[in-house]
Image (spheres, rainbow, N blue to C red):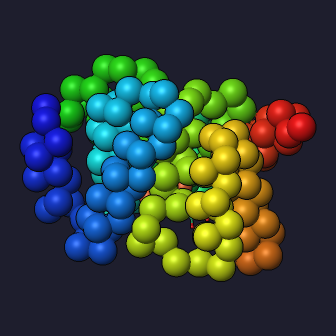
Amino acid sequence: MEREQYLAAIKPRMPEKRYIHTIGVMETAIELAKKYGEEEKKAETAAILHDIAKYAEIEWMENIVRAEKLDARLLGWGSELLHGPVGAYIAESEFALTDEDMLNAIRFHTTGRAGMSRLEKIIFVADMIEPNRKFDGVDRLRKKAEKGLDKAMSACVRHTLAFLIDTKQPIYPLSIECYNDMMKRED
Ligand code: GDP
Ligand code: FE
Ligand code: FE
Ligand code: FE
C-alpha cells in the first residue's frame, strides 16, 4: 500500500487532532530515517499506523490480548498501554504488515523496551518530538534528535519516566527496562 492509501484508511478511525499528530510523526520519522540511515518507507508506514488502535474500545483490546496471547501484564493497564501492542496486531491482521521491525516499532512505541532497533527508536522519538507536540522540554528533545538517535531516545525515555513519577503514575515494566538499557549505553 502507498502513503495515500494508508492515510485514507486511518483518517476515519481517529479525531482530526490525532490525524494531524500522525502526519507530524510521519514527517518527523522520515527526516530521522534519512538522517540515521533507516529505510524511509518503513519509517513512513510504521508512523502512519502507530496510533491506529488509540480509539479502539478497551474491552475489545483486552480480548485481543487474551485471544492473541499478547503480554498478559497488559490487562488492567488501560488503553494508553494497550494501543501499541494492539496497534501492531491491527497492522498485521488488517493491513497485512509482515515486517517484524515495523510491527515492533508500532508495538513498543509507548513504552520502548530493552534492545530497541533503529526503526523502533525513530518511531518512539518522532512520536514525542513531532511539530504539533507542545510540552515543557520538547525543544530540548528536538535538539537531542539532531545530535544522535541514542541521545534522543535516552532523553525521551527519561522525560517520559520523570513525567510519570511526577504525576504519580505506575510505570510499566518495559518502560523501566528501556530506561535501564538506555542508561547503560550512556557515555
Ligand atoms: P500518544 O499515543 O501519541 O499520545 O503517545 P504514546 O503512545 O507514546 O503515550 C501514550 C501515553 O502513555 C502517554 O500519556 C504516556 O505518558 C503514557 N505512558 C508511557 N509509558 C507509560 C508507563 O510506563 N506507564 C503509564 N502509566 N503510562 C505510560
Ligand atoms: Fe501512541
Ligand atoms: Fe511515545
Ligand atoms: Fe502517537
- Percent from the top left, x then y, of residue 49? 31, 45
- Percent from the top left, x then y, of residue 2? 13, 36
Quadrant position of the N terminus in the picture: top left
> Vertically, is 6 above or below 81?
above
Asked whether residue 79 appears in the rendered view, the answer is no
Displayed quadrant of residue 177: top right
Quadrant position of the C terminus in the picture: top right
Is residue 19 toward the left or the right of residue 104 in the image?
left
> Vertically, is 93 above or below 55?
above
Between 55 and 164, the one nearer to me in the picture: 164
Between 108 and 134, the one nearer to me in the picture: 134
> Vertically, is 9 above or below 165?
above
Is residue 87 toward the left or the right of residue 166 in the image?
left
| Identity of the residue drawn at 28% across and 26% down | 97
| Identity of the residue drawn at 17% across and 51% down | 7
Q: How many marks?
A: 0
- Percent from the top left, x then y, of residue 107? 48, 38
Between 30 and 115, the one nearer to me in the picture: 30
| Identity of the residue drawn at 31% across and 40% down | 44
Between 35 and 45, the one nearer to me in the picture: 35
| Identity of the residue drawn at 61% across and 70% down | 138
Is residue 140 toward the left or the right of residue 105 in the image?
right
Asked whether residue 145 appears in the rendered view, the answer is yes
Is residue 146 toward the left or the right of residue 114 in the image?
left
